[in-house]
Image (spheres, grey):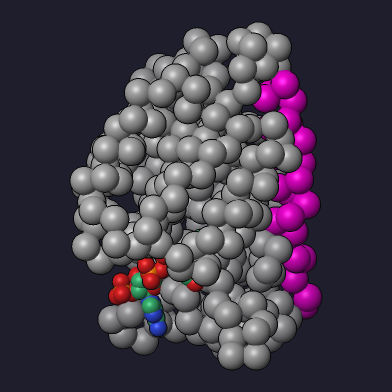
C-alpha cells in the first residue's frame, strides 16, 4: 500500500483563490479591504518567519496586514494597550498575537484582551470554550486547516476512531473538541501517556502534533489509517520534518500529509479565511456568529 499524499499547498491554493474573490467582493461593496494586525514580541527567528509568511499570504489575497513589533523586554501593559487600540480601530478586522510571548508577559491576559469579533486565531477564552459548546466565533486555524484537508479528501469523520497525539491549547485540545463535535471517538495522548502505540494503533484517523521527530513509526499505525502530521521540527542538518516517519508510514497509511507542504500552508490559509469572515461580519454581509448553526465550525467554505 502507498498512501495518497494530501497536498496542503494545493488545497490551500484553491481556498485562497476563493478568498481572493471574497476580498474583491468586500472591497467593491464596502470600499475597504479586510485588515489584519499582527503583534510580534521579541526576535524569535521561527516566530518572525511565521509572521512574514502570514503577512505575505495576506497581501497575495488582498488583505491589508500591518505589523506591530515590540522588543522582548516590553511591559505586558504596553502589549495589552496596543491590543486595546487595535480593538478600537475599525480598519482592523483581525488581531493575531504571535506566540510564544516572553515569559514575563501573561499570554492569557493578552489573548483575553483581543476583541471577540477580531480573534481570528481563535485563542480567546470564549472561542476556546465555545468550541466545547458549539458557539465558536472563529475556529483556531491549525485544527480548522486539518478539518478542511479531511473534507477536501472526502474522508468521513463520524463514528471513526481518532487519536490525537499532543494536547496543547492551540492544536491538540481544539482538534479533539472539533472531532468530538463531528461524532468521532477521540483519544488524546500527551507526553505522559503510557504506551502511546496502544492508542495510535486504534486510530482510523491519527493526528500528530507533539513536536518530536520520528515519534510515529509504521508499527504504531493501523493499515489503511489516515495520518495527519502537524509537527514541524528543524533537524540539526537544517531539514524540516514532521513527527511522523513519513517514508515508513506512507507504505501503511491510506492518506498522509507531508511536512513541509501539508498542514502548515492550511494554517495560514485558514487565518485568511477567518480574517475575511471577520470583515464580512463587521460589514453586515455575513451573519453574526451567534446566528450560525452549531455544526458550522468548518464554514464558511472559502
Ligand atoms: P506544544 O505546546 O509543545 O505541545 C506539544 C504536545 O505534545 C503536548 O501536549 C505534549 O505533552 C505532547 N508531547 C510531547 N512529547 C510527546 C511524546 N513523546 N509523546 C506524546 N505526546 C507528546 O506544541 P504545539 O504548539 O501544540 O505544537 C506541536 C507541534 O506542531 C510542533 O512541532 C509545532 O511546531 C507544530 N505546529 C505546527 C503548526 C502547523 O501549522 N503545521 C501549527 C502549530 C504547531 P504534555 O502536554 O504532556 O507536555
Magenta highlight on residue 14 = yes
Q: Position of residue 245 (x, y in %)?
A: 62, 83
> Residue drawn 61% across and 32% down?
64
Q: Position of residue 98 (x, y in %)?
A: 43, 53
Q: What stretch is highlighted in magenta?
A: 1-24
> Residue drawn 54% across and 39% down?
66
Residue 218 quadrant:
bottom right
Q: Which residue occupies the foreground of this view, 14 or 118?
A: 118
Residue 176 quadrant:
bottom left
> Residue drawn 61% across and 17% down?
32
Q: Is residue 135 visible?
A: no
How many marks can you see? 0
Q: In this view, does 35 lie to the left or right of 131?
A: right
- State which image quarter holds ligand 1: bottom left
> Residue drawn 49% across and 62% down?
47
Q: Is residue 266 left or right of residue 164?
A: right
Q: Is residue 235 above or below residue 2?
A: below
Amino acid at each position: 500500500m502507498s498512501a495518497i499524499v494530501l497536498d496542503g499547498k494545493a488545497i490551500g491554493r484553491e481556498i485562497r483563490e476563493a478568498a481572493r474573490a471574497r476580498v474583491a467582493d468586500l472591497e467593491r461593496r464596502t470600499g475597504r479591504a479586510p485588515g489584519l494586525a499582527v503583534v510580534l514580541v521579541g526576535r524569535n527567528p521561527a516566530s518572525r518567519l511565521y509572521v512574514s509568511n502570514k503577512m505575505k499570504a495576506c497581501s497575495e489575497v488582498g488583505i491589508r496586514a500591518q505589523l506591530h513589533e515590540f522588543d522582548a523586554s516590553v511591559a505586558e501593559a504596553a502589549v495589552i494597550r496596543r491590543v486595546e487600540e487595535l480593538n478600537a480601530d475599525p480598519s482592523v478586522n483581525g488581531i493575531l498575537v504571535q506566540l510564544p510571548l516572553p515569559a514575563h508577559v501573561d499570554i492569557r491576559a493578552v489573548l483575553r484582551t483581543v476583541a471577540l469579533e477580531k480573534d481570528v486565531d481563535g485563542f480567546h477564552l470564549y472561542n476556546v470554550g465555545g468550541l466545547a459548546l458549539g458557539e465558536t466565533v472563529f475556529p483556531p486555524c491549525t485544527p480548522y486547516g486539518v478539518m478542511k484537508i479531511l473534507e477536501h479528501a472526502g474522508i468521513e469523520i463520524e463514528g471513526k476512531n481518532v487519536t490525537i497525539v499532543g494536547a496543547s491549547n492551540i492544536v491538540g485540545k481544539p482538534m479533539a473538541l472539533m472531532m468530538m463535535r463531528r461524532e468521532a471517538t477521540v483519544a488524546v495522548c500527551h507526553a505522559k501517556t503510557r504506551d502511546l502505540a496502544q492508542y495510535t494503533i486504534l486510530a482510523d484517523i491519527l493526528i500528530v502534533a507533539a513536536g518530536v521527530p520520528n515519534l510515529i513509526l509504521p508499527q504504531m499505525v493501523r493499515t489503511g489509517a489516515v495520518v495527519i502530521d502537524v509537527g514541524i521540527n528543524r533537524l540539526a542538518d537544517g531539514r524540516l520534518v514532521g513527527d511522523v516517519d513519513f517514508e515508513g508510514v506512507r507504505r501503511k497509511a491510506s492518506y498522509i500529509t507531508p511536512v513541509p507542504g501539508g498542514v502548515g500552508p492550511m494554517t495560514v490559509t485558514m487565518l485568511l479565511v477567518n480574517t475575511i469572515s471577520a470583515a464580512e461580519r463587521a460589514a453586515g454581509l455575513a451573519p453574526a456568529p451567534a446566528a450560525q448553526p452549531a455544526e458550522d465550525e468548518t464554514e464558511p467554505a472559502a
